[in-house]
Amino acid sequence: MLVIPAIDLLGGRCVRLTQGRYDKETEYSRQPAEVAREWVKQGAQRLHIVDLDGAKEGRPVNIETLRGIASVADVPVQFGGGIRNAGHLEEVFAAGASRAILGTRALTDRGFLINALSEYGERVIVSVDVRGNKVMLQGWLEDSGMDFEATVRDLYGAGLREIIVTDVSRDGTLEGLDPSLIQTAASAGMGVIAAGGVGSLDDIRLLGQIPGVKGVIVGKALYAGRFSLAEALAEALNT
C-alpha cells in the first residue's frame, strides 16, 4: 500500500484546508517544489498534487508550480483540480504529471471519461469526493445529489478500475478515516486510494485490513507532525 504525501496548491503556496473550506486555510510553505523534494528525500514513492485554484475556476491554474515540482521529484506525480477537457489533460501531462486526476467533468459527462480512458488508460484516475454519502463537485463546493455507491458502480461500468475516495467532512480534521466509504468502493471492484481525515498510524493499519486499498493520501497529519512519513511507510509495509 502506497503512502502518498499531499501538496495542495493555492496561489502557488502549499496549504491545507479544513473540510474543503477555502476560508479555513493553513499555509505550510511558499516553496512547493522544496516541499516535494523533502517528501521524496524521506521516501515518498508518489506525490499527490491538488490545484485548489483550478478546482474552483474549472481549469488548471498552478501549472507552472506543477512543472517545478515535477522537475525536482524523481517519483510519479498525480495532479488534479480543474481538469475539464482534453486540452487540460494534455497541458497537465506536458507539465510533468504522470497521472491526471479527474473530478467534476468525469462525474457528470460519461463520454468525456470514456474518451479520456481510451486515450490515456491508467494514467487517468477519478477522485470521488463525498459528504454524507453524496458526491461533491466544483472543488467540494457543490452537492451534486448523486449517491456515492451508485456513482462508483457507474464509474466501474465506464471502464474505470481505480479511484480516489475523499471524505470531505473529515478532510483536514485529523479525526480518522471512515472505513465504510472505502469498503463500499472496494466492494464494487475498484482499487481505492483513500483520503480525508487520516490522523494517526491506526488509520494506516485500518486501511491495510481492507481488500482493494492501493494507497492512502496523507496531508495534515504529516505537516502537523502526528507521525513521520518514515513511520507511515513502515506501517504500510507491515499491512
Image (cartoon, grey):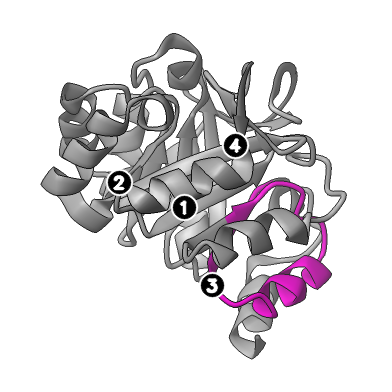
Residue 20 visible, this angle: yes
Judged from this view, the residue extending furthest toward the bottom is 238
Q: Which residue is mark 2?
A: 70
**Callout 2: few (<14), some (14-19), or many (20+) C-alpha neighbours within 10 Å?**
many
Q: Residue at x 31, y 47 (%)?
A: 158
Most foreground residue, 172 or 168: 168
**Residue 216 part of the magenta-drawn span:** yes
Which image quadrant: the C terminus? bottom right
Most foreground residue, 38 or 164: 164
Give the magenta part as a residue range. Answer: 194-219
Dots 1 and 3: beta carbons under 8 Å? no
Q: CA distance from mark 3 to mark 2?
A: 28 Å
Instruction: Return the x and y of residue 230 as percentages of the image width and height.
Output: 64, 74
Q: CA distance from mark 3 to mark 4?
A: 18 Å
The picture quadrant where one finds residue 79 is top left
**Residue 111 part of the magenta-drawn span:** no
Q: Is residue 31 above or below residue 5?
A: above
Q: Residue at x 42, y 60 (%)?
A: 46
Residue 34 visible, this angle: no
Q: Which residue is mark 3?
A: 212
Q: Residue at x 51, y 56 (%)?
A: 38
Amino acid type assigned to the residue bearing label 2 in the image: Ala
Instruction: Return the x and y of residue 19 as percentages of the image width and height.
Output: 76, 30
Q: Which residue is mark 1?
A: 163
Dots 4 and 1: beta carbons under 8 Å? no
Q: Which residue is mark 4?
A: 129
Amino acid type assigned to the residue bearing label 1 in the image: Ile
Per the image, label 1 sits on a secondary structure element best described as strand
**Callout 3: few (<14), some (14-19), or many (20+) C-alpha neighbours within 10 Å?**
many
Dots 1 and 2: beta carbons under 8 Å? no
Choose the circle earlier in sequence order: 3 or 2. Answer: 2
